[in-house]
C-alpha cells in the first residue's frame, strides 16, 4: 500500500500567517471574542483587527487603547463589514446568526472560524509555544483542547532559552555559506546533527 492510500485521520494543515498581509474581523466582542483577540495579539501584536459588536468587553477597549491596529465598531453586524477582510472569527452569542454570517463570509471566499461550531470552521486555533524565533503550534484535531494546553506547558518548561541563540547562530552561518545550495544543505545538516544526538541539551 502506498503512503497516500492510507486513511488520513488528521488532515489539518498548519500554516503560519504573516500578520502584515491579512485583515482580521471578529464579530462579537464578548467572552469568546475577547479570548480570540487576546490570542491574536499575543502572537501578532501588529495584526490588523476589526471588532464589530453590539456590546464590547472592557478588556477589548483596553487592548485597543494599547494597539492602534485594533479598531472597534460598536454596532450590529452588517454584511458590508466583511468587505476588505481576509479572516473572520464569528463569535456572537446567537448560533443561527453565526451560521448566517458564516454563509455570507463563505460567499465572499473568506476564511472563517465559528467559535461555537468547529464543524463549520475553515481553520482552528491551537496552543502556541514561542521561544524567540521558534514557534510551535499544537492541535489535537479538536479531540482535547486541554491536552493542547498541557502539552504547551510541557514544551514551554523543557525548551531552554538558549534556543534563541542557537537559531541566531545558525542564521548567521546560513547567511555566511555562500556556496551552492547542495553544499549549503549538507553543511547545515552536518553542523546541526548533534542537536538531535545530544538531545538532552535541546
Ligand atoms: C476546535 C477548537 C476551537 C477552534 O479553534 O475553532 C476548540 C473547541 C472547543 N474547546 C472547548 C473547550 C475548551 N477549550 C479549552 C482551551 C483551548 N481551546 C483551544 C482550541 C480549540 N478549542 C480548537 C481545537 C484545538 C485542538 O484541536 O486542540 C486552545 C488550544 C486555543 C484557543 O482557542 O485559545 C485553548 C488552549 C490554549 C492554551 O492555553 O494553550 C479548554 C481548556 C481551558 O480553557 O483550560 C476547554 C475546556 C476543557 C475541554 O473541553 O478540553 C470546547 C467545548 C466548549 C463547551 O463545552 O462549551 C470546544 C467546542 C467543541 O469541541 O465542540
Ligand atoms: N465563553 C467562552 O469562552 C466560549 C464560548 N463559546 C461560544 O461562543 C459563543 C459566544 O459566547 P460568549 O462570547 O461567551 O458570548 P457573549 O454573550 O459574552 O458575547 C457575545 C457577543 O456578541 C455580540 N453580538 C450579539 N449579536 C450581535 C450582532 N447582531 N451584531 C454584533 N454583535 C453581536 C454581543 O453584543 C456580545 O458582545 C457562544 O455560542 C458560546 O457557546 C465557545 C467557546 C468558548
Image (cartoon, rainbow, N blue to C red):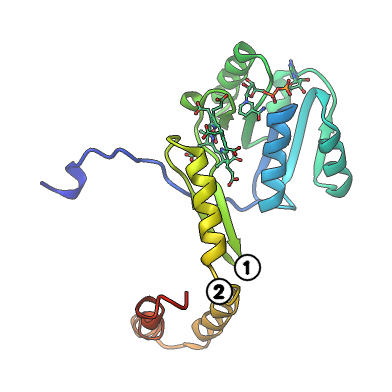
Q: Position of residue 149 (x, y in %)?
A: 54, 46
In terms of depth relative to the viewer, which is nearer, 71 or 110? Answer: 71
Q: Position of residue 196 (x, y in %)?
A: 37, 76
Ligand 2 lies in quarter: top right
Q: Residue at x 82, y 30 (%)?
A: 57
Q: Residue at x 62, y 37 (%)?
A: 86
Does residue 20 show up? no
**Left or right relative to 56: residue 151:** left
**Left or right relative to 36: residue 63:** right
- Closer to the chain start, of discs 1 and 2, is 1
Mark seen at residue 132: 1
Q: Position of residue 104 (x, y in %)?
A: 60, 19
| Vertical order, 143 against 80 (above or below) | below
The residue that label 2 is drawn on is 163
Q: Position of residue 135 (x, y in %)?
A: 55, 60
Does residue 5 show up? yes
Amino acid at each position: 500500500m502506498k503512503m497516500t492510500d492510507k486513511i488520513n485521520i488528521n488532515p489539518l494543515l498548519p500554516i503560519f500567517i504573516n500578520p502584515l498581509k491579512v485583515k482580521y474581523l471578529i464579530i462579537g466582542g464578548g467572552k469568546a471574542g475577547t479570548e480570540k483577540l487576546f490570542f491574536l495579539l499575543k502572537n501578532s501584536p501588529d495584526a490588523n483587527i476589526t471588532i464589530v459588536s453590539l456590546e464590547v468587553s472592557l478588556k477589548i477597549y483596553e487592548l485597543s487603547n494599547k494597539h492602534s491596529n485594533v479598531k472597534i465598531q460598536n454596532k450590529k453586524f452588517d454584511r458590508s463589514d466583511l468587505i476588505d477582510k481576509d479572516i473572520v472569527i464569528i463569535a456572537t452569542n446567537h448560533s443561527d446568526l453565526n451560521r448566517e454570517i458564516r454563509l455570507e463570509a463563505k460567499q465572499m471566499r473568506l476564511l472563517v472560524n465559528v467559535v461555537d461550531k468547529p464543524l463549520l470552521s475553515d481553520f482552528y486555533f491551537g496552543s502556541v509555544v514561542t521561544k524567540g524565533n521558534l514557534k510551535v503550534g499544537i492541535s489535537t484535531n479538536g479531540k482535547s483542547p486541554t491536552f493542547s494546553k498541557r502539552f504547551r506547558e510541557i514544551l514551554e518548561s523543557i525548551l531552554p532559552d538558549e534556543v534563541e541563540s542557537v537559531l541566531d547562530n545558525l542564521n548567521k552561518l546560513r547567511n555566511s555559506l555562500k556556496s551552492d545550495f547542495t553544499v549549503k544543505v549538507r553543511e547545515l545538516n552536518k553542523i546541526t546533527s548533534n542537536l538531535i544526538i545530544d538531545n538532552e541539551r535541546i
